[in-house]
Amino acid sequence: MKSVEEKRQREKAMVADMIALYCRKKHRTAKGTLCADCRKLTDYAHARSDKCPFMETKTFCSNCRVHCYKPQMCDQIREVMRFSGPRMLFHHPIAAIRHVIATKREKRKLGKT
């Protein structure tokens, strides 16, 4: 089993990749750069992940029983996820497949499927 810190770093990398893809496609930023709003969202998501007390037992924020994002940030991250989620398969296929498998496994475990 992975350590809590490894899970935290993987989650932070995934959300950063998804926000970067969203920013590049929607805001026309150069690869490797983010607009101010997307930088703020990334920093916020990383801060939430750093403070998450459920990291040991959860897979991703979408499967968490407590949603700690502020409503505005929650709306922004939801928009990013809806846009970037399907496209991750083309940009980061291994990470995308790993994410889908882990999410399905977690939902099955929680009886949500």
Image: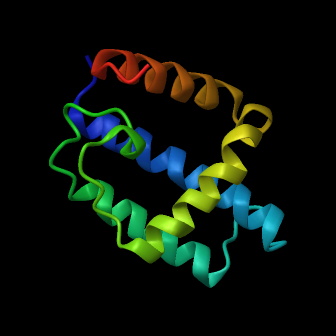
In x, y percent, where is residue 105? 41, 16
For the C terminus, the image quarter is top left
In the rendered image, the residue lying farthest to the left is 53
Give 78 or 28, whichever is nearer the viewer.
Answer: 78
Q: Going by the image, does 84 lie left or right of 48?
A: right
In x, y percent, where is residue 92? 69, 35
Q: How is the image coloured?
A: rainbow
Which residue is located at x 61 percent, y 83 percent? 36
Q: Going by the image, does 79 lie left or right of 3?
A: right
Which residue is located at x 38 percent, y 61 percent? 46
Figure quadrant of residue 34: bottom right
97 over 23 or under it: above or below: above
Q: Going by the image, does 5 lie left or right of 95?
A: left
31 over 92 or under it: above or below: below
For the N terminus, the image quarter is top left
In x, y percent, where is residue 40? 50, 77
87 over 46 or under it: above or below: above
Which residue is located at x 46 percent, y 72 percent? 73
Q: Going by the image, does 12 lie left or right of 24?
A: left
In the rendered image, the residue lying farthest to the bottom is 36
Give 57 or 6, whichever is nearer the viewer.
Answer: 57
Give 103 or 15, whichever is nearer the viewer.
Answer: 103
In x, y percent, where is residue 21? 72, 55
Give 84 or 8, whichever is nearer the viewer.
Answer: 84
Figure quadrant of residue 32: bottom right
Which residue is located at x 23 percent, y 29 percent? 3
